[in-house]
Image: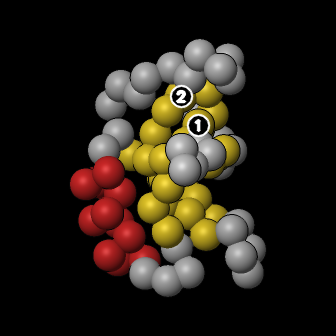
Amino acid sequence: MAYPKNIENPGMYMAWGVLKDRDGWDLRGPYDSKEAADQVFELCGDPYEVVYGSWRAGTDEFIRKPSDN
């Protein structure tokens, strides 16, 4: 999988993540498409969520992209 580099955060890549950040942090992969992340979310369910953001390869470091709203 090829992830686009995040030019705002050197060393990080843009990806879809399935994560939970309450009751303990857990990142279920990075994914290169929302569809792939949605499939994993279907298996995990609540309290996980699908989010887009920056991921540091080889780690579970993931920073949500702020909403454009």
Q: Which mark sits nearer the N-terminus, 1 or 2?
A: 2
State the image quarter where residue 55 is shown. Answer: top right
Residue 45 is left or right of residue 56, and the answer is left
Residue 14 is left or right of residue 8, and the answer is left
Would you name the residue on which mark 2 appears?
13
Residue 36 is left or right of residue 68, and the answer is left
Q: Tell me the kind of residue under disc 2.
A: Tyr
- From this view, report whether residue 62 is shown above or below residue 43: above
Q: Residue at x 32, y 75 (%)?
A: 42
Q: Residue at x 59, y 37 (%)?
A: 54
Mark on residue 3?
none
Would you name the residue on which mark 1 appears?
54
- Seen from this angle, which residue lies furthest front? 69
Q: Residue at x 63, y 34 (%)?
A: 56
Residue 19 in the image, given as x and y percentages of width and height? 56, 63
Residue 43 in the image, given as x and y percentages of width and height? 35, 77
- From this view, report whether residue 46 is shown above or below residue 39: below
The secondary element bearing badge 1 is classed as strand
- From this view, report whether residue 51 is shown above or below residue 53: below
Q: Disc 1 versus disc 2: distance between alpha carbons?
A: 5 Å
